[in-house]
Image (spheres, coloured by chain):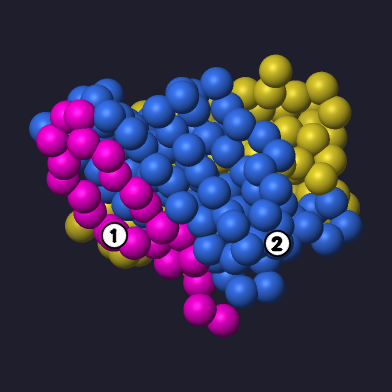
Chain colours: A blue, B yellow
Amino acid sequence: DTGVSQDPRHKITKRGQNVTFRCDPISEHNRLYWYRQTLGQGPEFLTYFQNEAQLEKSRLLSDRFSAERPKGSFSTLEIQRTEQGDSAMYLCASSFSGAGTDTQYFGPGTRLTVL
Amino acid sequence: AQSVTQPDIHITVSEGASLELRCNYSYGATPYLFWYVQSPGQGLQLLLKYFSGDTLVQGIKGFEAEFKRSQSSFNLRKPSVHWSDAAEYFCAVGATPGFQKLVFGTGTRLLVSP
């Protein structure tokens, strides 16, 4: 199977601009996750979808962040009015929820730099 | 709340030597535990996982990990390190049965010397 893909791989933007990232999960996976990883840290959970429903959001996900998964397939993460503190690697993962022990598989990430 | 501690920020190992990376978790119930590896600028690759059963689990690339409930540990080991193993290693815990998110440690950077 083709793993999780993310687009773009790198994004450089100016402060105040909006950006959107896309994630395509493994095809049969019904769960999709977004994480953020800053330099020298482990990934931190942002939000999660089961099919098209967004079931949990972290306190890290401020009002400037919005995520969608309109048809239960690919997902987008939008950041409005970017700030320098948003610079990070944004990781997407997907899993299949069977027997309550699903395993998350990660994409290559989108590295965002806000100038 | 659940948490993961990886006490070693950096570890340097000679090529061919054995490796042990430490991971301690804090979680009240039976944890679901994972080790992932990340090469520079890349996403995370799953090395191995523990859900239940045998406390010694085998993974890819010759890695293994042992779950020790009494020590709240899930240390990663490899008997002979290769230069290509140089990367960042993350331990993670799944928070609840049917968990919806992973909680990661801060990672251990492995350097391999010739």
Start-end of magenta stretch: A1-24
Point out the tag, 2 or 1, that comes first from the N-terminus: 1
Q: Is residue B49 visible?
A: no
State the image quarter where residue B48 is shown. bottom right
Could you say where residue B87 lies in the image, as x and y percent from the top left?
A: 34, 51
- Which residue occupies 54% across, 35% down? A45
A78 relative to A38, above or below: below
The Cα–Cα distance between marks 2 and 1, rounded to whole angstroms, is 22 Å
Q: Amino acid at mark 2?
A: Asn
| Mark 2, residue position | A30
- Which residue occupies 61% across, 74% down? A27
Q: Residues within 10 Å of mark 1 (few under 14, many from 20)?
A: some
Could you say where residue A60 lies in the image, as x and y percent from the top left?
A: 49, 24
Could you say where residue B104 lies in the image, as x and y percent from the top left?
A: 54, 34
| Mark 1, residue position | A8
State the image quarter where residue A25 is shown. bottom right
